[in-house]
């Protein structure tokens, strides 16, 4: 009986990532672990490139140069080690893009309210095509939501703008 923990062992769990099976791979096309690596002719020169595409996506997450083979005409064939490195690199690229996107849409500052208590104020931009807006959320010292208000997506959050906003909210309430 095959060891179920061995690399490339079939998995009964449908949610588990698909393991690489070298016998199913082609020297220029590898699929596994939710990714497809495709070696392509580089149209700009005589070289080769590799495109890493996440399953379900139409555009590659990563495109980079690929090594020539020994004959200096054809690409080096994909192998398990190269594919694993490409998966790791492409996954890191997607993770950095997600972090950058989150940083663009979320900002958090500490500000002193009118009562002298420091609170955390978060601004979360909602990039909706039909109704773009932002949500300003105030958290108390225990991390509980004190208030939540809709604001313009152009609202510039800083400790000073948060302090002024908290003072206006206290005067209105």
Image (cartoon, helix red, strand yellow):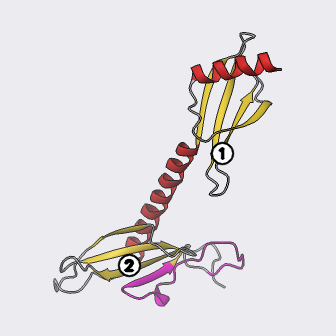
Residue 163 picture location, percent across and down:
64, 18
Left or right: 144 as drawn, with respect to 57: right
Q: Circle 2 — which element? A: loop
Q: Decide: marks 2, 1 in contact (CB < 8 A)?
A: no
* Residue toward you, 2 or 143: 143
What residue is drawn where x is 79% and y is 30%? 147
Q: Residues within 10 Å of mark 1 (few under 14, many from 20)?
A: some
Circle count:
2
**Residue 84 spot, x, y in % from top left:** 44, 69
Drawn side of residue 166 relative to residue 127, left or right: right
Is 96 magenta? The answer is: no
In the drawing, does residue 84 fall left or right of residue 75? right
Looking at marks 2 and 1 on the same chain, the residue that comes earlier in the sequence is marked by 2
Residue 133 is labelled as: 1
* Relative image position of residue 6 (x, y in whole percent): 58, 74
Numbered badge on residue 79: 2
Q: Residue at x 36, y 86 (%)?
A: 27
Residue ID at (83%, 20%): 173
Q: Name the chief secondary structure element in magenta.
A: loop
Q: Position of residue 159 (x, y in %)?
A: 58, 22
Neighbours of disc 2 within 10 Å: few (<14), some (14-19), many (20+): some
Viewer-side label of 2, 1:
1
Magenta span of residues:
10-31
- Residue 12 magenta-highlighted: yes
Tell which of 166 and 145 is nearer to you: 166
**118 over 30 or under it: above or below:** above
- Is residue 6 found left or right of 76 in the rendered image? right
Alpha-carbon span between mark 2 and mark 1: 47 Å
Rendered residue at 56%/32% (across/down)? 156
């Amino acid at each position: 009986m095959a060891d179920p923990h061995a690399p490339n062992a079939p998995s009964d769990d449908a949610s588990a990532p698909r393991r690489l099976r070298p016998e199913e791979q082609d020297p220029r096309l590898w699929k596994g672990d939710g990714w497809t690596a495709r070696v392509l002719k580089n149209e700009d020169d005589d070289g080769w490139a590799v495109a890493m595409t996440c399953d379900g996506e139409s555009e590659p997450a990563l495109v980079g140069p690929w090594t020539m083979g020994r004959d200096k005409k054809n690409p080096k064939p994909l192998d398990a080690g190269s594919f694993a490195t490409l998966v790791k690199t492409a996954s890191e690229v997607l993770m950095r893009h997600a972090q950058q996107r989150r940083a663009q849409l979320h900002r958090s500052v500490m500000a002193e309210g009118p009562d002298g208590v420091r609170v955390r104020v978060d601004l979360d931009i909602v990039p909706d095509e039909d109704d773009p807006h932002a949500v300003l959320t105030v958290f108390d010292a225990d991390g509980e939501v004190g208030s939540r208000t809709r604001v313009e997506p152009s609202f510039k959050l800083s400790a000073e703008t948060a302090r002024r906003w908290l003072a206006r909210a206290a005067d209105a309430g």
